[in-house]
Each structure stands twice: as structure tokens, then as C-alpha cells.
Image (cartoon, grey):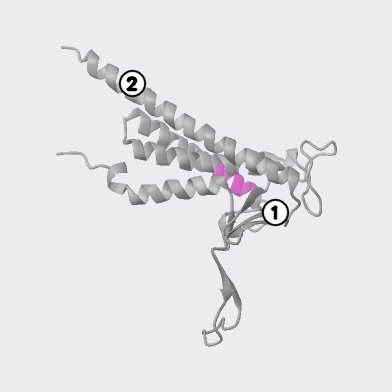
Amino acid sequence: MFPIGQIAKEFRNKTMSLKKATLIIILVLLIDQISKIYIKTHFYLGEEIEVFSWFKILFVENEGMAWGAKIPGTHGKLFLTLFRLVAISGIGYWLWDSVRKNSSSILIFCIALIFSGAMGNIIDSVFYGIIFDSSAHQIATFMPENGGYGTLFHGKVVDMLQFPLIDGTFPKWFPFWGGENFTFFDPVFNIADSAISIGVFLLILFNKKAFPKNAE
């Protein structure tokens, strides 16, 4: 007997998973890009607002990879952007294949977070150089008449979230850094970075649920 009911159920599950993944991607991209555009059009580079003692809004621009690392050379930035495009194509295929195979909900959720975060930063890298002018010592203009601060594929990623949970001074007796100031969790990041980090963290935390072993 042809299992029409089973096929219909699988189709509904795939459709529901795809809708949920699409919703996650759209929401993350909207929040990420709205926050970046707001910061870019209301803050000058380096401007800082202390919301709480442990939370600051600090506008910085990342020209390269995570933690401010850069690929040297004239074409380093272009290579990085192209690499990101190739990487997100692979993540997109992973997401599509997971939905097609009716993989676990946690796996699809995590991949959607990682995909949306990667896409958010790619938008900056590809387009921000041509749709904004420089933020150095001024507030940038959206779609400036004289053109942007860079060219296509040479945009800078906008970061603005900082959580200096502990800000203090090393004791005098502390080796090497005694008496120097230190801040615990100093990096500045954005919503897209958060989505990627949460996605990866959940994959590690719920590894067995995300990648269940097939019963023999």
C-alpha cells in the first residue's frame, strides 16, 4: 500500500521546518541590519555610550576577521569577502539538506542562526563601502552623493556591543601585569556575531540531539 499519509506528514514537517528557519533568518537579519544602520547614521567612529557599568555601546568597524585580525596585502579584504560568500553557500546547502532530510529541530535552528549571522556580516562587507561614507570624526551619510568610503566587496563590518563585566586593576604581586588595568570580556561585537556564537554553542551543548545516531 502506498504510504500517502506518511509522505504527507513528512512534507508538512519539512514545510514547517523551512518556515521556522526562514523566520529566524529574517528576524536576525532585520535586527542586525537595523541596529547597524542606526549606529552608522547616529554615531561617529569611536563614540561610546555607557548603558550600564557592565554594558556599553561602542561604535567600531572591523576591517577583517574576528578579533580584528586582517589578511595582509592589497587584495586581503577582497579575498576575505569572497571566502565568506563561499562559506555561506556551504552553510546554506547544509541548512537546505537538513530540512530535506527532516533533521532535528535543534540542528535546523542552530544552522539558521549561523547562516543569518554570517549573512548579516557579509552584507556589511559587500555593500557598506558603497552605501555609506566614512564615520571617522563624523556621522556617516546613507547613500552619499559623492559615493561611499570604499568599493563593492570592501565594506567594513559594524560592531557596537561591549560587555565589560569586570573592569579593574591587577594586584601589584600579579606576575607580568601587576598594577595594570584589565577588562574582562573586552571584545566589541554585533547581533550577527551573537547569532553565530549562540548557534555554535547550542550545537555543542545539544550535540546528541542535533546529530542523533541512527538506530541499527
Q: Earlier in the sequence, mark 1 or mark 2?
A: 2
165 vs 38, left or right, is left
> Can you say whether 194 is above or below 67 in the image?
above
* Residue at x 45% of width, y 48% of height: 198
Crowd band around label 1 with a 10 angstrom C-alpha radius: few (<14), some (14–19), many (20+): few
Q: Is residue 4 among the parts visible in the rendering? A: yes
Q: Give residue 202's mark.
A: none
Residue under label 1, please give it: 74
Q: Is residue 69 among the parts visible in the rendering? A: no
77 vs 85, left or right, is right
Residue under label 2, please give it: 12
165 vs 199, left or right, is right
Question: In what element is the residue under mark 1?
Answer: loop
What's the CA distance linking mark 1 and mark 2? 50 Å
Quarter holding residue 169: bottom right
Counting from the top left corner in percent of width and height, residue 187 is at 58, 60
Question: In what element is the residue under mark 2?
Answer: helix
Question: Does the magenta portion include 11?
Answer: no
Quarter holding residue 51: bottom right
In magenta, the rendered stretch is 78-85
Counting from the top left corner in percent of width and height, residue 89 is at 49, 37
Magenta stretch: dominant secondary structure:
helix
* Residue at x 53% of width, y 32% of height: 26
Q: Amino acid at mark 2?
A: Arg
Counting from the top left corner in percent of width and height, residue 103 is at 32, 34
